[in-house]
Amino acid sequence: MDILKQLQQRTDQFEVVHVRNESTQVRFESNRLKTSQVEETKGIAVRVVKQGRLGFAASSDASATDQLVKNAIESAMYGDQVPITFPAAQSAPTVKTFDPMITDLPIPRLVEIGKEIVDYILQIEPEARVDVSLKRGIQQVALHNQTGNEAAYHSSPLSISVLVNKIQGDDVLLISDFTGTTVWQEDYMAGTRRLGEKLKLARRLVAATSGNLPVLFAPDGLLMLGLPLQQGLNGKSVFTGISPMKGKLGEKLFSDKLTVIDDGTIDGKFGSAPYDDEGVPHRRTALIERGVLKNFIYDLKTAAQSGVASTGNGSRTLFAPPNPAPTNFIVGAGDTPLADILAGIDTGLLVEDVLGLGQGNIISGAFSNPLSLAFKIEKGEIVGRVKNASLAGNIYDLLKNIAAISRETEWVYSNLNLPYLLLPEMNVVAKAG
Amino acid sequence: MQEKILAALKSSKADYTEIRLEERESTTVAYRGKNLETASAVIDAGGIVRCLCKDGGWGIATFNDRDNLIAKVEQAYQCAQVAHNDEPIELAPVPVREERIAASLQRDFRDISLADKKALIEGYNQILLKHSDKIISTSSAYSDSFSRITFANSEGTFIEEERPMVAVFTSAIARDGDNVQTAYETRSGQFGFEFVMGQEDKARTAAQRAVDLLRAESVVGGQYPVIVNQELAGVFIHEAFGHLSEADFVYENPKAREMMVLGRRFGQDILNVYDDGALPGLRGTHKYDDEGMPTGRAYLIKNGILVGRLHSRQTAAKMGEQPTGNARAISYRFPPIVRMTNTAIEQGTTCFEDMIKDIKLGVYACGAYGGQTELENFSFSSAYAYMIRDGKIAEMVKDVILAGNLFTTLLNIDAIGDDFQWMHRGGGCGKGAQYPLPVTFGAPHIRIQNVVIGGKK
């Protein structure tokens, strides 16, 4: 704890984060087990406040503490004046992030699960090529600051990613699934089954229809609309003035079917922990409630700059200072069963995945993406896969008018919980032939 | 350290063993609007051991503590025995080399004070902020990094290579009511501090473009003939074609091999594409790749015909082709995989005036926000664009995202410009979990017929 003493003497406020991660991974490539890997990561990140100025430094060399302290103090000499206060200990929610069932998984068991996934897919599509990666780990995070606040916890992330590619002539179909959890799930095949269903539906290619059509976003596809929303709700975009939602708290901006929540307190999810990365307790924050803008997400610095309190959304990697980021980002379930939504569509599109997610000027709400996996709906039935179609629009217009949101939701991309969402009309551009 | 490394290699029971150690010091100074986000230095040091057991598989250990390399080799060896393959994994032979490569920088950025680095980027940031009252925020960053990589393998290769990198990024965000527009300019290369000095014009260009974009209408969706500028053409060839030419996609997939069979026509006779990891100063350049293979020029398309692909030692051996020096890793935390270095469409013969004069209604797409490919389908977004009307550049339009099918689109390239440029832009390429890897693109203007552009009706 030598470093804490040094910092106590030489700075007004400080924060030291020790990170220690270990993981074990097995990777299948083209249906075969190819690689197994162990990783050990250690590092220290330091923030200091000296004469009201904020400084940062980090190192993966645990022995270089003198250099680290020197770098942090030099950084503070040039740092901006921010009225930031590293917080004293506050009571945090109980959140399950660790499960010995995961850390005790032997490598042969990881290999067995991988094999089960490959076999399941090959039984549906014998000619497919399947890449599977299974990774289990232990992460230990310990934060100390000048108040004596010691926020420490450990977690046991398990991730299963599956990528299937199927080539027929010049037609390439790529479908992937990612499952991330810190608590053992007995039904570890759920993601693979979901992927299998998509593979079956994708067998038949049908011509896309251009024009104004109802578009149903599946949970995976809904990120196309969710990403601009996340950026707009980020306190940093609000503080810098680039968020179109700036200054609109309390206003009804969207359809009353839309509710958006950030919740870092759900057991076992990748975005969950008792504290955020600055020692602020996680919480459940309603961001949009029945279409009304309720809150933005903040870390300590952005909150201090904006004159509000942190919402417990400080997020960091070892080598960069924290920024506000969603914990678990949730679009609230609706009241219509998915089957009823589908049944009500005469001619429409089901969007599962898009290309180029997040590229373009998405802070403005605008998006424009080709669809990498989409299905045509005819008379309430999914009739086949559509290629060479793209969608464009602006979420601040489109989300004013939502036709339906499903009762069913799914966890996708590890920290998003999303429903099926139907927009009554979008301009679909499809290339002929 | 050399003795420790050699002793650890000697202790290995695997058929092939390599050790790569890295020490990286980097500095970042970043502004957001008028606020300094950070001015800080980080130190990252660690290593990776990779073992191959021919009847097993690859075993990998990554770590920060470099004290006990023999134990790390043993760990990696244990990992390599987890897999059992009937078909042994072979590595294509590469020359055994012993070499030390020192970076030579005109003005070594490690000797420049944090105060001077801050002053440089603050100056550019001020240009952005003062340009117009429409500019409500900015994002400006200076960064440098200096890595020392030591690579050694059980075949006797021992290479030490210094890899410097310097970059500036200036981005302006303009707003008018609900309309928010962003424009950016960057400059990056393996050079000293002088390379990022005197870039005030870049900041001015970014600021003016963000303001101009406020008045631009969204493009009307549809199919157009499109002229693509050098920067976007470079991103295009990287995204749409380059990734498909990475052999790890085809080497164990018979269907993909059929699709990417050498000799297949990909473009018209005018199209030539190469990747070259040996060009001084470019971001993707190293004398050796991360398997110790010397880099060089690999032609991918010659006169419209597919003539080559990018290899690691493993993919080259499997396909009976030559390794190309394209096995790269973003850091010691990752094993090398097949990646591009500096990828280019070669200089053509058409001047810009000839390219545009016959287009009645089209789009001139410039700059790039990014791109993505899912093999035969790609998407890439231009940073700004103009309509082409009656052979002339007309009004600015925004939200121009080009999408399409690789095979038809490459064949639809019907003119290649005589104005080739390497783009010294920052940013990097992502593949799997490995992002961002420094790469460079180069191209002249190109014209593509029948491109689908999403947008309003």
Image (cartoon, coloured by chain):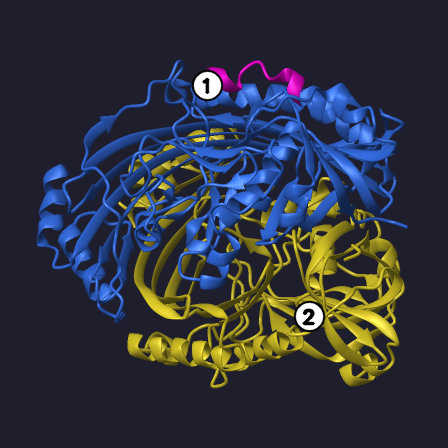
Q: Is residue A128 magenta?
A: no
Establish if A20 lies above or below B96.
Answer: below
In the rendered image, which residue does mark 2 sit on? A219
Measuring from the top left, give residue A238's x and y in whole percent: 74, 46
Decide if residue A30 is on the left or right side of residue B141: left
Q: Chain of mark 2?
A: A
Nearer the observer: mark 2 or 1; the answer is 2
Decide if residue B418 is on the left or right side of residue A255: left
Decide if residue B334 is on the left or right side of residue A54: left
In the image, B360 versus B289, the foreground residue is B360
Range of magenta residues: B194-202
Q: Residue at x 32, y 50 (%)?
A: B320
Asked where in the image residue A411 lies, by quadrant, the reply is bottom right
In the rendered image, which residue does mark 1 sit on? B193
Asked where in the image residue A379 lies, by quadrant, the reply is bottom right
Q: Chain of mark 1?
A: B
Measuring from the top left, give residue B232's x and y in whole percent: 65, 34
Q: Amino acid at mark 1?
A: Phe
Establish if B317 lies above or below B128.
Answer: below
Q: Residue at x 86, y 43 (%)?
A: B178
- Label 2 and label 1: CA atoms lie apart by 47 Å
In the image, B322 versus B363, the foreground residue is B322
Residues flagged by tags 2 and 1 on a common chain: no
Asked where in the image residue A71 lies, by quadrant, the reply is top left
Q: Amino acid at mark 2?
A: Pro
Badge 1: few (under 14), some or many (20 or more) residues near its Cα, within 10 Å? many
Can residue B68 be seen?
no
Chain represented in yellow: A
What hue represents chain B? blue
Measuring from the top left, give residue B180's x and y in whole percent: 80, 40
